[in-house]
Structures are given as structure tokens and as C-alpha cells.
Amino acid sequence: MTGKRQLDIVLFGATGYAGQLVARYLATHAPGGVRIGLAGRSARRLADLRVRLGAAASAWPVLVADSADHESLAALARAARVVATTAGPYHGQGLPLVGACARAGTHYADLAGEVLFIRESIGRFHQVAAGAGARIVHCCGFDSIPSDLGVLLLHRAVRADDAGDLEDTTLVVTALKGGISGGTLASATGQRDQMRASAQLRRAARDPYALSPDRGAEPDLGKQPDAGWVRYDRDLGIWVGPFPLARLNARVVRRSSALQAWAYGPRFRYREVTGYGTNRAAPVKAAALSTAMAAVGGGLAFRPSRALLSRFLPGPGQGPSEKTRREGFFRMEIHGRTSAGAQYLSLVEARADPGYAATAVMLGESALCLALDHDRLPGSAGVLTPATAMGAALARRLTSAGQTLATRRITP
Ligand SMILES: NC(=O)c1ccc[n+]([C@@H]2O[C@H](COP(=O)([O-])OP(=O)(O)OC[C@H]3O[C@@H](n4cnc5c(N)ncnc54)[C@H](OP(=O)(O)O)[C@@H]3O)[C@@H](O)[C@H]2O)c1
């Protein structure tokens, strides 16, 4: 990073739904002395937000920038050591800020969940960021921090025991309650539109190694389907169904392994499912919920049904109520089997709405981690993943913030 910076962290998109939650998290949890700025399109709305954040934020400067104004983004990137951004959808408007941060050697964290956007970011800016010493980190929310850090911790436990390499590894969502925001829906439909418009992009996004740093060096492990349908899983001994975030999370986890010289193992196979348990109602519940999710996804894919559905769904700037955020939760188990026959389990959970309350903690702590934990971060720069940019330092922070990330060996 070159030169002195006016701020440690600047939060861009601060006036949006997720942005305001992250701003509140930083106002209540950043250590005294951390210099934070609020950035967005409207000075007046940023100033109003600063008032609502109370005394801790009263001296935070307000910076006006627009994703369409590249000079304003360059100024933002030069002003801070870390830019955290919730200005989405990221596809179509997010890349100029990534580029500005990569060139300025400024660390960057976002909530992107769009595989094609991340893929383009890697292609265009990995080398630039690596050269300038910037850590560009996408997916610093519910997608994909629990998956990415959970598998990293699994791998570390296996290594510490010298128990071989990770092979079949499955994340099972065992409990989940939360809401959705207009910004998330807009991002999801934007990515669907992009894929519908181009067979080439569809193929790219469906490649299990879509985010690989070196596609030709990836192992050939046969089919690695993202979803599958409802079925009884003999290995896990439970009924399982698709998990909608698997498509992104699995690619991020595979990139993390590859960026660490394929450290998880040459036969590392990873998938994510929703778990429905073993009782007699499990297959019925699995089929009902999976069908409902598929129906909403399908409805959002086509413009006429999307227009109808959007009357009942949140719009831009809207999201789950305070009660929904407070009463939400998630619990994930990651089951790993090694080449030596040992079995391990990671548990990742939080008692808060996953996509918003828990995500505000994850992005807020990611920004603090990039700004304050420099000596504890793993080696490299470039377009990284949460595990390879922040790794155990971020896991420690999230644990201190009340989230659970724990790993144990199952077999003796
Ligand atoms: N990965 C996860 O777990 C996770 C969780 C939650 C959200 N997200 C993602 O986070 C993003 C934001 O979601 P949200 O619900 O907060 O959406 P939102 O409420 O609609 O907020 C979007 C933000 O982007 C800003 N923005 C839009 N166009 C801009 C431009 N041209 N220049 C500068 N700023 C611009 C908006 O500014 P104004 O305020 O001026 O309109 C607003 O602050 C979405 O992409 C969503 O998918 C991901």
C-alpha cells in the first residue's frame, strides 16, 4: 500500500439496506481510534445516517461517490486503507471500484454473490492487485464466509493431526431462518438474466472450477453437481435437498484450495446440501421446501412472472424487519473424510438472520480484519477469498463476535 491514508475504512453503499446494518455494526464495535468514513451517492442521506448512528460516528467523514463516476471511485480508493462495499448489484457497476482499489493498493471487501462478476474481477484485476499489494475479497457475507472458513478450519485440523488429505467433504445446512432484501433479489435476477442471454456465460458459471486461478491444473474428479434433488443420502444417513447458495459457495471453496496450491488435497470433492433429518416427515418436508424454492427461482427468471412476484417481494432499499433479523439463525455442519479414513466435523452457526444481521457482523469484521490484523493475515495479495485473504484471523474475530466456528475429529 502506498502513501498515508486519510481513513482506515470507508464503507461504500452505506445508505442501502445492508450498508446501514454494516455502518451500525462498525459504529458499535470498531475499536476507538479506527478512522471510518461513510460513502455513497447522496451527501444528505449519508449525513442523516451519521446522525442516526449516534456519538461514535459523529466525526466520521462523508464521501460522495458514484459507481458511474470513475474519478470519484479513484478518490475513494486513495482515501482509505480498506474499502468495504455494499453497493450492489455488483454485476454491471461493481468492477470499476474493484479496479480502483486494485490499482491503488487498497484492500477491498464486498458482499458479492454473483459468480460471473467475481470471475471477471479475477480475470481483470488479480494480477493488478497482486502487484500493488491489495487484497480484493469478494463474498464476505453469509455467502461464502461460513463455507469458506468452515472448510479451512477442517483442513487445518486434518493437517495438525497429519491425517491425510481432505476428500469427500459435504456442508449440510441443518437449520436456517431469515429474510431477503430487494438488493439480493436484484443481484440474483441480474445474474440469471446474464446467463440466459449467453450460452458461453452459462457454461462458464456452471463449471465447478469457474473461479479457479488455473483451470488447466484442476483435478478431473468427474461430475460435481451443485444441487441434485431430494434423496436419502446414505453417507450422511439423512434426507437431503438442494441448498441455493451451493453454486457460489462451492466455487469459492475450490478457489481457496487452489490458491493454497491445492492444499485441501488432490481428490478434494466438495458439495453443499440442505439437511432434513431422518424422521418420516423428512422427505415430504424436503420435497415441499425444495419445490417452493425452485418455483420462486423459476418465477424470477421470466420477466412477466417476475413482475407479478415483485409486488410481494422487497424492493431496492428494503429488507427483513428488525424482528426477523433478531429471530433468525443458521447452523451448518461440514463433514470431511480424509485419504487416511479419518472423519472430521466443522460446525458453523450464529443466532441472527444469516443474510443481514449475521452478514453485517461478517463484513464489518472483515473490514476490521483487513485494516487492523495485517501481521496475522496469510501471505499473498490479489483477488482472493475470505479463507485465503484473512483465514484464521477472521475466524477468531467472528468467534469473539459471538458466531461459532468449531472443528473436531469424529473417528478416533
Ligand atoms: N452475500 C451476502 O450474504 C449478502 C447479504 C446481503 C446483501 N448482499 C448483497 O449486497 C448488495 C446490496 O444489497 P442491499 O439489500 O443492501 O441493496 P439496496 O438496499 O438496494 O442497496 C444498494 C446500495 O447500492 C447503492 N448503489 C446503487 N447504485 C449505485 C451507484 N451507481 N453508485 C453508488 N452506489 C450505488 C445504493 O445507493 P443509494 O442508497 O444511493 O440508492 C445503495 O446504497 C446486493 O448485491 C446483495 O446481493 C449479499
Image (tube, rainbow, N blue to C red):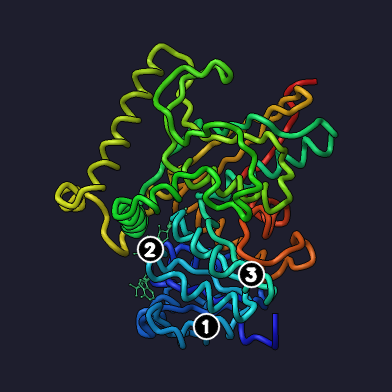
In the rendered image, residue 74, in percent from the top left (x then y), is placed at 52, 84
Which residue is drawn at the image coordinates 65% and 42% (left, top)? 405
User: Quadrant for ligand 1?
Assistant: bottom left
Q: Residues within 10 Å of mark 1 (few under 14, many from 20)?
A: many
Residue sitting nearer the eye, 338 or 185: 338
In the rendered image, residue 61, in percent from the top left (x then y), is placed at 51, 85
Disc 2 marks a residue whose amino acid type is Pro
Disc number placed over residue 127 in the picture, else none: 3
Residue picked out by circle 1: 76
- Helix or strand or loop: what does disc 1 sit on? helix
Q: Is residue 388 left or right of residue 326?
A: right
- Helix or strand or loop: what does disc 2 sit on? loop
Above/below status of 105 relative to 213: below
Q: Is mark 3 within 8 Å of ligand 1?
A: no
Disc number placed over residue 344 in the picture, else none: none
- The quadrant of the picture occupied by the N terminus is bottom right
Disc 1 marks a residue whose amino acid type is Leu
